[in-house]
Amino acid sequence: MNETSTVWEWFERPENSMRRNRFTEAMRGATAHYPPELYTSAIDWDSLESGAMVVDVGGGVGNVTWILAQEFSHLLYVVQDMDKVIPEANKFWRATSPESISSGQIEIQAHDFLKPQPIKDAAVYFMRFIIHDWHDVEAIKIMKNLRDAAGPSSQLILFDIVLPNACRRKSSEHTLIGSGKRKSTSMSPPVSMLPPGIDWATSVDMQMLNLFNAQERTLEEFVALGKASRWKFQVMKPGKPLSAIIFSPA
């Protein structure tokens, strides 16, 4: 079969609606495997002004937004995904929190993140398990679209797998882990055993290559994507397997 479309274009075909809905449900179920604290502690959400806008880009039905909205009800949220996901998103919110929709706290919006971002100057844009689905060219385009919409104080959070380096090496100047303090390490020789978790992460990396012509990335590679799209890396908050990688406008 000589298929030239992407997986996402293939999912959009009417004959693949069952497969698309199955994928949406799988992504919703995957959220339950990660502790809510991964999202609620990524930044100081309480410090954001009442009514500040948070945009869940490519958010599926909005499972992560639901977690945040329960904890930080002073914020407004937009959940964005492709047209054909919107009915499932509306169904999810009608079942779990209909008052959030009726009050205007939550907006469900059809949007293709490869096109210009319609929500300008949001306090936070975030993506979960999005960038690892795309080649560098498209990943930079997605992040640039958000940068073009961002205001001076906007933040971008990527919730994604950060691939460990197979060997220890000299730390680059931008490495920030958790505390936000810059650390510099001396050159270390390669080690004979892979770091914990890299075997699993590498297997997912191969899946991304085969399915999407994409990849998992090291911290250095995420920082490079940020530089190419005019986002300045701030901090990484490690998690298992998802980490929060936080950027500000460059």
Image (spheres, rainbow, N blue to C red):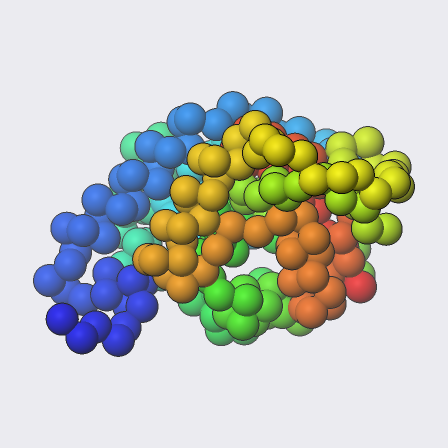
Of all residues, the one furthest to the left in this rendering is 15
Residue 168: tell me if it is visible.
yes
The N terminus sits in image quarter: bottom left
Q: As drawn, is 236 to the left or to the right of 163?
A: right
Most foreground residue, 28 or 239: 239
Identified at 61% across, 53% down, the residue is 125
Q: Quadrant of the C terminus?
A: bottom right
Q: Say how many tags the image has.
A: 0
Where is residue 133 drawn, in percent x and y? Answer: 44, 56
At a point 33% along the width and 46% down the height, the residue shown is 89
Q: How far across and how far down the image is residue 14, in percent?
A: 14, 64
Above-or-below relation of 241 to 8: above
Residue 1 placement, left or right of 84: left
Q: In this image, 118 relative to 250: left or right? A: left
Q: Give the residue displayed 40% in from the left and 64% down from the top.
A: 213
Q: Where does residue 97 sit, x and y in percent of width and height?
A: 39, 32
* Residue 94 visible in the current orientation: no
Depth order, front residue of 2/115: 2
For this rendering, which residue is in front, 163 or 244?
163
- Left or right side of 232 for 90: left
Q: Quadrant of residue 240?
A: top right
